[in-house]
Amino acid sequence: MEYRHFSLIQRYEVTRSEPYAPAFLLIEHRPSFTYNNPMTNPIRILVDSDACPVREEVYKVADRHQVAVVIVANSYMRIPKDPLVSQVVVTDKFDAADDWIAEQAGPSTVVITSDILLAERCVKVKAVVLPPTGKPFTENSIGMSVATRAIMADLRSGVGQTSGPAPFTNVDRSNFLSALHGALVRLKRNA
């Protein structure tokens, strides 16, 4: 098998205990600094970046708080040339990005995702989970969100096309910025 060589990118094989084949990741390397060291600042932001409308906001808030950001996607995306920002490109296997994020999430992690099932997996491991609208998923709210998702899936399968989610607005963007800032402040205070 032949692999292309990209500048600043290396291929890693990640073995898993699950019965399916291992995932292959492309990880973009950036210089490491002391604030990326898990021993000195374990807080980081994991972004499920496929169709994420708030990536630029994440970069700004992470830079202000000096917190590492990992962009996770199944294809290469442009990211800022910032040592705090790195990218993980997973295989195009179904839910590969979600699986990687769920494995990496923990109590000192902020996960940005619109995927309710991924949010549920991350909330179970005590990660802070924010959708782009800024209303956090918590242990108390995730059950209702999963149930609503299931009901909407049933309605879509029976009725056909439904209206879908509300359009993303500037109010949502503002709420997200406020929620992400607040989450990072709380995590730093508890660290």
Image (cartoon, rainbow, N blue to C red):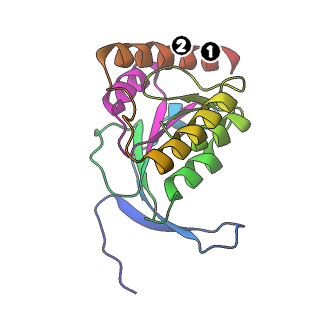
Q: Position of residue 136 (x, y in %)?
A: 57, 22
- The reply to whether residue 42 is in sight is no
Do callouts 1 and 2 mark residues in contact (Cβ within 8 Å)?
yes
Q: In the rendered view, would you say 149 is above or below 141?
A: below
Q: Residue at the location (45% across, 36% down)?
A: 69
Q: Residue at the location (55% across, 19% down)?
A: 184
Quadrant of the frame with the C terminus: top right
10 Å crowding of disc 2: few (<14), some (14-19), many (20+): few
Q: In the rendered view, would you say 108 is above or below 51?
A: above
Front residue of 63 and 47: 47
* Among the 4 quarters of the image, the one containing residue 118: top right
Residue topped by disc 1: 186
Extent of the magenta region: 43-71
Judge left or right: residue 5 versus residue 19: left
**Which label was assigned to residue 182?**
2
Q: In the rendered view, would you say 47 is above or below 157?
A: above
Is 46 colored magenta in this rendering? yes
Secondary structure beneath dot 2 equals helix
* Among the 4 quarters of the image, the one containing residue 91: bottom left
Judge left or right: residue 63 versus residue 40: left
Judge left or right: residue 186 versus residue 47: right
Is 25 colored magenta in this rendering? no
Secondary structure beneath dot 1 equals helix
Q: Position of residue 15 (x, y in %)?
A: 63, 68
10 Å crowding of disc 1: few (<14), some (14-19), many (20+): few
- The reply to whether residue 86 is in sight is yes
* Among the 4 quarters of the image, the one containing residue 40: top right
Residue flagged by tag 2: what amino acid is it? Gly
Residue furthest to the front in view is 159
Q: Position of residue 60 (x, y in %)?
A: 35, 23
